[in-house]
Image (cartoon, rainbow, N blue to C red):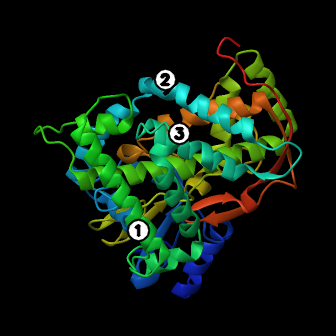
Amino acid sequence: MSLPPGPRLPPVVQIGRWILSPLKMLEECRARYGDVFSFKGFQGRHFVIVGDPALIKQIFTGDPDTLLAGAGNAVLLEPILGKHSLLTLDRGEHLRQRRLLLPAFHGERMQTYATSMRDITESSIGRWPLHRPFSLAQSMQDITLDVILRTVFGLERPEQHGKLRTDLVAMLDIAANPLLLFPGMLGIDPFAIPWLRLTKLKRAIDDQLFAIIAERRRSPAGGTDVLAMMLAARDDHGEAMTDIELRDELVTLLLAGHETTATSLAWALDQLLANPPALERLRADLDAGREEYLDCVIRETLRVRPIIPLVGRQLARPYQLGEWLLPAGTQLAPSIYLAGHRADAYPAPDEFRPERWLGVKPDPYTWLPFGGGVRRCIGMAFAQFEMRIVLAAVVQRARLSLVDGPAKVVRRGITLAPAKGRMVVAIERAAQRTAAA
């Protein structure tokens, strides 16, 4: 058998269902076909979805020159991120870029960004309206975008990044339409149609990024922001990153580091507000100076509500996956969602139970919100560190209430976000906590 058994639906119908109802499709297919199944996409592409931890381990520990993550991501991400993004590169080019970027994301560097993250969060909470509904997702996006602009670019004052921030928000709001995934699947770049506002916004953002890069090259002042470290980094041959390489990595950090973390924070608060005992335990532990349960909440949120449902790999040559021999060009897709919703790994997998993580380390083949293997997200430590600071501040300073029940999952671009932005009401807002407190 060359391909695992899977649903045999017309390609357009299958892709349409995948784009509009991905989790429902994954659940139905696993119930019918098991942990490995396939479907056909546009242009004859064959996708093999994998929810079996043993096979996921095989993929994550396999030869990266055969299992190409960059090629697997390029169809949807290259139009906006570029050819030199860490997410769209493979082989030696990927390894070079990863080595150049790693120093800025080592765990011990996170303390450098802590004050900025905390100040931005406290300021945002102070502006939340009382007794009037507001969008939690939008508030989290405001926080994480300001964090990225300050920690990655070193832009601290609004006049330094006002237009860039406005253009980024506008572009992301347009790109959030899931129907824009269809052109990408057909090989059409939705960011390259001259008369579209999306294209104009991307061009404007690029112009601003190149101007920032040029200014920083003319006046290298050092600093602790990520861009300063990227400009100073040199590869094994003593070569620095080019302007286009810097642009692509900056866009990657802006989009991947902003949108995904904001959505995870919105989901974490949605789950906590829908589970008052978990929220009260977290608040009590934080007030007592204990943070283990905070980490449990973050891990459980990323398991129950992963931001993307799959990880992509494209086969450069024929490949034996378990009992199946797969042809070159096949898209392998370990499923973050299916792996994290296995009853044998997580009893009552659909329930939000942070306590299941007390004293437990994540299994990298059933808990994979940041991917795995040599392609695990370079911003994993940054994202989790930011979530810890933001969640702690919100839980300790604000008393929030859901406008309605737990949010439904909807697509926002390639991510899975809470419907309607997760509307909440701030019932009470405590005074800003001092550093001594």
Where residue 263 sits: x, y (%)?
63, 51
**Which mark is on residue 390?**
none
Specify the label residue 147 is tagged with: 3
Question: Tag 2: residue type?
Answer: Gln
| Residue drawn at x 59%, y 85% as measured from the top left | 13
**Secondary structure of the residue carrying numbered label 3:** helix
Q: Residue at x 40, y 54 (%)?
A: 251
In the image shown, does 130 or 173 lie closer to the viewer?
Answer: 130
Q: Give the image location of residue 317, x and y in percent.
A: 26, 67
Residue 421 visible somewhere in the drawing? yes
Depicted 253 relative to depicted 429: above or below: below
Foreground mark, 1 or 2, reads: 2
- Mark 3 is surrounded, within 10 Å at the Cα level, by few (under 14), some (14 to 19) or many (20 or more) other residues, namely many
Q: Residue 111 carries which label?
A: 2
Neighbourhood count class around disc 2 (C-alpha, 10 Å): few under 14, some 14–19, many 20 upward: few
Return the residue nearer the eye: 297 or 121.
Answer: 121
Q: Can I make out residue 367 in this image?
A: no
Q: Mark 1 points at which residue?
A: 331
Q: Position of residue 360 (x, y in %)?
A: 62, 29
**Which element carries disc 1, helix, strand or loop?**
strand
- For label 1, the crowd category at 10 Å Cα-Cα, with few meaning under 14, some 14 to 19 and many 20 or more, is many
Q: Nearer the viewer, residue 32 or 12?
A: 12
| Residue 358 in the image: above or below residue 175 | above
Question: Separation of disc 1 and disc 2 at Cα?
Answer: 38 Å
Given the image, on which type of amino acid does mark 1 rest? Gln
Amino acid tagged 3: Val
In this rendering, the answer to whether 34 lies above or below 244 is: below
Of marks 1 and 2, which one's residue comes earlier in the chain?
2
